[in-house]
Image (tube, rainbow, N blue to C red):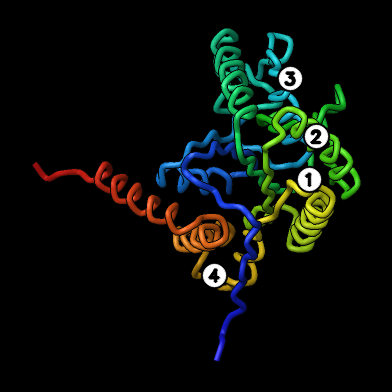
């Protein structure tokens, strides 16, 4: 007898190995998976702009990496004593223009070079909702606690997402012909606007990704959203906020990812790296 709908992830036809270079960008779910990859000894570069949730801002960031863009003082603004970039997470913000620009441009320069050599790009879409700056019409990655009236909230359509990403994928392939792109939709629900809005949001992202993977043979999909919402359909797999996956759920999703994308040798190496990581984290009594 079966008491749950376990999801089997089909093999994509290739394996990820420790010789690969992997760039991960997107929502906070990326940070969780990238930590597992780092602990398992993979060469990764994670969120060069910080955590980014919507497909439009993610596309803007990758375009900056393709062009190896240099940010200047004109790209920053001052709010509550700190200089910020609308394209970056607050971890790049600071009291000194020079320091903020140095951090931003160093990250772009490093990740632009990494992208040119990467074997795999992992993209996690978190929400189809965007915030557009009233003064310029720019879609921002982070509102940095500016007043709500500074922005117009909009929900991207499927065609808006696919239209932008169809062009971007071709640009990425021209930059790096060997690059494979793995999409996933974050299993973390966006509960701010309610249950129905979250479902509509995720449906748009899922349909857009499905169209992209059908159109581009170098694009793939990993069902982290479906694993969390259907396979692990129980609140014991959630953190205290009942929104984020807990450690047990992340372990399970990571295991499912490994079954689909790692061969036997890679999985054995993962275990060796994990043992070493535990030893490094161990605190001796004396």
Pointers 3 and 4 in contact (C-beta within 8 Å) = no
The C terminus, quarter of image: top left
Task: Identify which residue, 170 or 149, lies in the foreground.
Answer: 170
- Residue picked out by circle 1: 129
Mark 1, mark 3: which one is toward the viewer? 3
The residue positioned 68% from the left and 13% from the top of the image is 70
| Disc ID at residue 169 | none
Of the two numbered discs 2 and 3 on the same chain, state the one appearing first in sequence: 3
Quarter-wise, where is residue 285 in the image?
top left
The image shows residue 68 at horizontal and vertical percentages of 69, 18
Crowd band around label 3 with a 10 angstrom C-alpha radius: few (<14), some (14–19), many (20+): few
Please name the residue that numbered disc 4 is placed on.
235
Q: Are marks 1 and 2 in contact (CB under 8 Å)?
A: no
Marks 1 and 2, the one that precedes in the sequence: 1
Q: Locate residue 104 relative to residue 201 in the image: left or right.
A: left
Which one is earlier in the sequence, the residue at label 3 or at label 4? 3
Viewer-nearest residue: 144 or 141? 141
Q: Is residue 240 visible?
A: no
What residue did someone put label 2 on?
A: 168
Mark 4, residues whose alpha carbon is within 10 Å: few (<14), some, or many (≥20)? few
**267 displayed left or right of 225:** left
**In the displayed structure, would residue 35 be above or below residue 142?**
below
> Measured along the vertical axis of the image, is residue 5 above or below residue 19?
below
């Amino acid at each position: 007898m079966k008491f749950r709908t376990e999801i089997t992830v089909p093999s994509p036809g290739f394996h990820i190995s420790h010789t690969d270079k992997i760039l991960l960008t997107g929502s906070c779910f990326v940070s969780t998976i990238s930590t597992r990859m780092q602990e398992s000894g993979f060469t990764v570069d994670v969120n060069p702009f910080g955590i980014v949730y919507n497909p439009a801002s993610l596309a803007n960031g990758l375009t900056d990496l393709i062009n190896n863009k240099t940010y200047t003082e004109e790209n920053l603004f001052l709010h509550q004593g700190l200089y910020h970039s609308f394209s970056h997470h607050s971890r790049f913000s600071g009291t000194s223009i020079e320091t903020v620009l140095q951090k931003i441009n160093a990250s772009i320069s490093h990740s632009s070079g990494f992208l040119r050599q990467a074997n795999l790009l992992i993209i996690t879409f978190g929400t189809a909702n965007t915030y557009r700056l009233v003064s310029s019409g720019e879609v921002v990655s982070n509102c940095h606690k500016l007043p709500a009236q500074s922005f117009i909230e909009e929900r991207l359509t499927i065609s808006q997402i696919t239209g932008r990403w169809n062009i971007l994928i071709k640009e990425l392939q021209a930059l790096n012909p060997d690059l494979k792109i793995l999409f996933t939709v974050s299993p973390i629900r966006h509960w701010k606007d309610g249950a129905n809005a979250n479902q509509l949001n995720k449906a748009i992202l899922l349909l857009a990704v499905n169209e992209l993977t059908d159109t581009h043979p170098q694009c793939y999909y990993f069902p982290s959203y479906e694993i969390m919402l259907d396979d692990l359909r129980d609140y014991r797999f959630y953190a205290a906020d009942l929104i984020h996956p807990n450690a047990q759920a992340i372990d399970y999703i990571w295991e499912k990812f490994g079954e689909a994308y790692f061969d036997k040798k890679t999985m054995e190496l993962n275990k060796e790296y994990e043992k070493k990581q535990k030893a490094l984290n161990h605190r001796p009594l004396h």
